Image: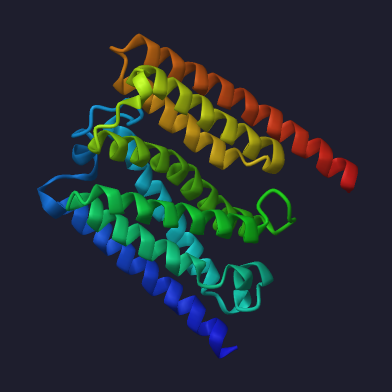
Amino acid sequence: MRKDTARQWINVVALVVTFAINSLAATLPLGGLTTGEISDLFPVYFTPADYVFSIWFVIYGALFFFIIYQALRSQRENPRLRRVGYLFVLSALANTVWLVLWHFQIFPFSLVAMIVLLLALIAIYLRLGTGRTKVSAAETWLVQVPFSIYLGWITVATIANVTSVLDYFNWSGWGISPEIWTVIMLGAATVIGSLVSLTRGDIAYMLVLIWAFAGIAVKHAGTPVVAIAAWVAVGLVGLMTVVGAVFHRRRGRRLA
């Protein structure tokens, strides 16, 4: 009992600290540049328009609802939250470390922190049983949806981080143009999203991909190959969102 109470409050502290560091990074900003401005230092096409980064307000808002919910006495013995354990603390630490490394332009190690964050969120997602486990409406909206949004964004951010680090090392791309590599990465991200939709029926995750891909299309409207590919990806992800939702609704009826 005491252990679970400690976990609940350590999670609260972890989010508050992470949010504080993120706020300082945006207002100071750390290293003299905002997160988006540092992204703009790299001439890569997988980076979305600056307005897309406002999704962090949604992510942190959703995570604060999660933190309040998981701290309730009634959730102390919630088996899914207990399985998550301290993975949220790990994700918060990785998020904070990434932010510091990124803002002080230590890019290779920032990718390591980003991968740790991605893996932590995948582990949380799987342990919550999103799309596989029946839970209350409250747990769906206050636990599963926040992590779906978070994981969706970090999926995109990891790909963007990889492209930035490769550019930092002046990678030649094996002779393939940056525009074509962006089309390939959009295709890969679309496949990942489609698999999530078909296996989990996760609408929140898919909407984040649509938001990010549309932002890529807007930012690179002057590069037709990238813009068209991004809009096609938006359409395909939207279609797979509907297909996945219908598939899971029908499967749920068969199992009922």
Residue 143, image x and y in percent? 57, 59
Seen at 43% across and 56% down, the residue is: 117
Q: Quadrant of residue 43?
A: top left
Name the outermost residue toward the top: 224
Image height check: is 100 above or below 227? Answer: below
Seen at 38% across and 15% down, the residue is: 227
Left or right: residue 8 versus residue 158 is: right
Image height check: is 74 above or below 60? Answer: below
Seen at 34% across and 17% down, the residue is: 177
Name the outermost residue toward the front: 174
- Between 137 and 198, the residue placed more toward the observer is 198
Residue 103, image x and y in percent? 20, 51
Q: How many marks?
A: 0
Seen at 66% across and 72% down, the residue is: 78
Residue 166, image x and y in percent? 31, 36
- Between 166 and 209, the residue placed more toward the observer is 166
Q: Quadrant of residue 81?
A: bottom right
The chosen color scheme is rainbow
Q: Quadrant of residue 214?
A: top left
Left or right: residue 133 versus residue 142 is: right
Residue 237, image x and y in percent? 57, 26
